[in-house]
């Protein structure tokens, strides 16, 4: 008797870049199949192969139609002001007929004929139509609820300061969100909660995620890529990756300071590829085999992990790199690797502590 296992699993290829100037979308795939974009009454498709990169070309009419709706000026009230809207303007914005930012829909059919059951959406924000940042509280994605369209403006107190909180919550579909410049809120005393919801979501921010921005990726295998996280000690930047096998990558030479990166259960990877210091940052990763890797100092930071085989790697080509703060790794076979330098090498913070937990560390 020969037993055969029926292939019923469809894994959506990962989108890694969107180039509107060349009508192209690129990515990688973990299985063979065909990716489709049906938009503006046309279908573009590209065959993809396991372990290989791919590029799909859209038609001129498709890219032109998408760039006409991808990042509109969504509200008349408050104009293009960087200031928070006053109460009367908030009411006007909530009462206005909605103007939505559109997306490109994706479909993947693998070689066995399986179709991914979850919708796949590509968003592209490239205009500062109001507050600072190309993606901000005044954007209105078609498959999201915002504080001005279906939601509300709330408040939160940190210390003695009360902040207005603006929230954008995406649907449970798989979203790939490209932000050409910054992800930001208004100019003072406010917070912007960006919630990607369930699904395997990816957020690409070409420049900075600014202070007061709270990113919640939700359940799923998610990824956040940004050049810099610029928090404030009174209003830090938060990246909550949620449960799943998640990735955070700092991709450029910007700073990472006064920020918090949280991961739930799953194998999480935090990679800091810039050559600037990382400091005053909290890393809180859940159960799983987690890795934090940086190429320069990791200063005055607080690192906690749960059970699993965890690694902290400071892999610098220069001498005398430093790892300081409070480090508590859970049970498991954990490793701290410094290719050059030492723990609390510069005496940057008094009382640096390291707890490796139970296991052969």
Image (spheres, rainbow, N blue to C red):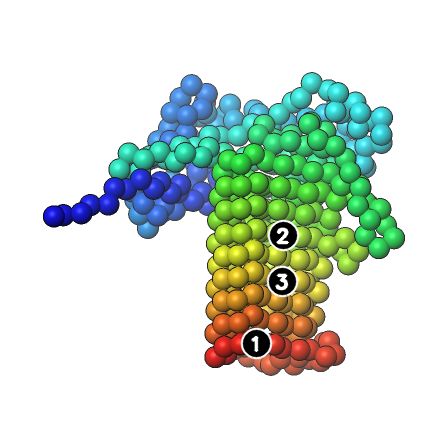
| Residue situated in front as seen by the camera: 324 or 309 | 309
CB under 8 Å between discs 3 and 2: no
Sort mark 3 into few (<14), some (14-19) or many (20+) by Cα contacts within 10 Å: some
Sequence-first tag of 1 and 3: 3
* Label ID, residue 219: none
Q: Are marks 2 and 1 in contact (CB under 8 Å)?
A: no
Picture quadrant of residue 12: top left
Element at badge 3? strand
Q: Nearer the viewer, residue 35 or 220?
A: 220
Q: Earlier in the sequence, mark 2 or mark 1?
A: 2
For image coordinates 62% across by 46% down, the residue present is 216
Q: Establish if 41 lies above or below 238.
A: above
> Mark 3 to mark 2: distance in Å?
10 Å
> Residue 170: x, y in percent?
59, 35
- Residue at figure coordinates x 73%, y 76% from the top left: 349
Q: Position of residue 175 (x, y in %)?
A: 52, 38
C-alpha separation, residue under disc 1 versus residue under disc 3: 15 Å
What is the spatial separation of the Cα atoms under label 2 and label 1, in whole angstroms? 24 Å
Q: Earlier in the sequence, mark 3 or mark 2?
A: 2
Determine the secondary structure under disc 1.
loop
Q: Nearer the viewer, residue 293 or 170?
A: 170
Left or right: 71, with 42 as reference point: right
Whether residue 187 can be seen here: no
Please tell me the numbered disc located at residue 283: 3
Depth order, front residue of 233/68: 233
């Amino acid at each position: 008797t020969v037993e055969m296992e029926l292939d019923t699993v469809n894994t959506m290829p990962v989108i890694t870049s969107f180039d509107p100037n060349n009508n192209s979308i690129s990515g990688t795939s973990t299985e063979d199949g065909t990716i489709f974009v049906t938009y503006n009454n046309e279908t573009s498709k590209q065959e993809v192969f396991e372990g290989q990169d791919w590029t799909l070309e859209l038609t001129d009419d498709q890219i032109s139609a998408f760039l006409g709706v991808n990042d509109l000026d969504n509200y008349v009230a408050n104009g293009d002001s960087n200031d928070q809207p006053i109460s009367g303007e908030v009411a006007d914005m909530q009462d206005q007929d909605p103007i939505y930012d559109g997306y490109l829909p994706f479909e993947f059919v693998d070689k066995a004929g399986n179709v991914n059951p979850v919708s796949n959406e590509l968003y592209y924000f490239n205009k500062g139509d109001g507050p600072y940042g190309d993606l901000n509280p005044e954007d209105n994605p078609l498959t999201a609820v915002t504080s001005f369209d279906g939601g509300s403006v709330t408040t939160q107190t940190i210390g003695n300061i009360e902040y207005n909180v603006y929230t954008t919550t995406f649907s449970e579909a798989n979203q790939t969100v490209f932000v050409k410049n910054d992800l930001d809120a208004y100019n003072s005393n406010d917070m912007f909660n960006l919630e990607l919801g369930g699904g395997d979501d990816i957020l690409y921010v070409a420049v900075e995620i600014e202070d007061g921005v709270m990113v919640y990726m939700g359940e799923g295998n998610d990824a956040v890529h940004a050049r810099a996280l610029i928090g404030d000690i009174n209003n830090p930047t938060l990246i909550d990756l949620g449960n799943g096998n998640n990735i955070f990558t700092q991709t450029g030479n910007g700073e990472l300071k006064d920020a918090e990166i949280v991961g739930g259960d799953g194998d999480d990877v935090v990679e800091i590829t810039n050559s600037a210091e990382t400091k005053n940052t909290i890393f809180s990763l859940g159960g799983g085999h987690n890795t934090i890797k940086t190429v320069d100092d990791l200063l005055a930071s607080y690192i906690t992990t749960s059970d699993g085989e965890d690694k902290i790697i400071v892999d610098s080509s220069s001498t005398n790199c430093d790892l300081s703060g409070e480090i508590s790794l859970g049970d498991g076979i954990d490793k701290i690797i410094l290719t050059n330098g030492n723990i609390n090498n510069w005496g940057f913070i008094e009382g640096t502590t390291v707890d490796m937990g139970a296991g052969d560390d």
